[in-house]
Image (cartoon, rainbow, N blue to C red):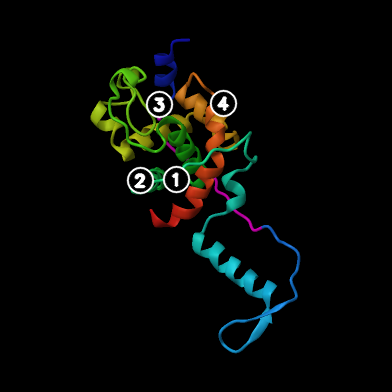
Amino acid sequence: MNTTILRKSVLGIAGLAFAGGLAAGPLNHATTDTGTGEARPVAAVQADKADKTDKTAGVDAGKLIPHGVQGPQSRIDLDPEQTANVNAIIAATKKAGLDERAAVISIGTALQESKLQNLGHLGDRNDHDSLGLFQQRPSSGWGTPEQITDPEYATTAFLKGLRQVDGWHDMALTDAAQTVQVSAYPDAYAQWEQQAADLVTQHWNNS
């Protein structure tokens, strides 16, 4: 089927789930000074810290990756611009009324498509007229070049497409992303799921 038709067919907005959960380790009966002169079991102190961290994060880590990751995972270091794009994606996801799982799928998709860089036209290296975080194409109906290179617009457009995918919330990231993006490399998105989940956990409450 024509790629342009496929990409146009998935354009529309929002609903999803999130992730989290602490893995309990073996009990530790050693004690530690809490700084108040009170000796408490190390395990109890660690549990308190974990509980506070979990509540502060406000992210249910178990639902971020409901089916676990698929295959080997990749990871890149982010510069300030890439980190700003993470926050822009999360902010747009919240504005669309979607939850952390949608943000994981969006960030994982952008990691594969652009390494979270808001790419302009790359000349001979360009994939046709693909632009922006999600490498969306003006000629396929995603918007104007100016719109597609706006992180909020680009994310909202991606999420509209995602929301029209039946069962997207329960899909593996790579399947959900591929249905929207119609990539020549449909399995490539899977490698970014863990980093995407980590980024959502880290930045969800900052955006």
Q: Nearer the viewer, mark 1 or mark 2?
A: 1
Q: Nearer the viewer, mark 2 or mark 4?
A: 4
Task: Specify whether residue 14 is painted magenta.
Answer: yes
Q: Where is residue 8 in the image (x, y as percent from the top left)?
A: 39, 20
Q: Distance between the residues labelled 2 and 4?
A: 25 Å
**Residue 125 seen in render:** yes
Q: Distance between the residues labelled 1 and 2?
A: 18 Å
Q: Distance between the residues labelled 4 and 1?
A: 22 Å
In which quarter of the view is residue 107 placed?
top left
Amino acid type assigned to the residue bearing label 3 in the image: Leu
Amino acid type assigned to the residue bearing label 2 in the image: Ala
Amino acid type assigned to the residue bearing label 1 in the image: Asp
Task: Report which residue position mark 2 lands on.
Answer: 88
Task: Report which residue position mark 4 lands on.
Answer: 187
Q: Indicate which disc, 3 or 1, sits on the residue closer to the N terminus.
A: 3
Q: Position of residue 177 (x, y in %)?
A: 50, 30
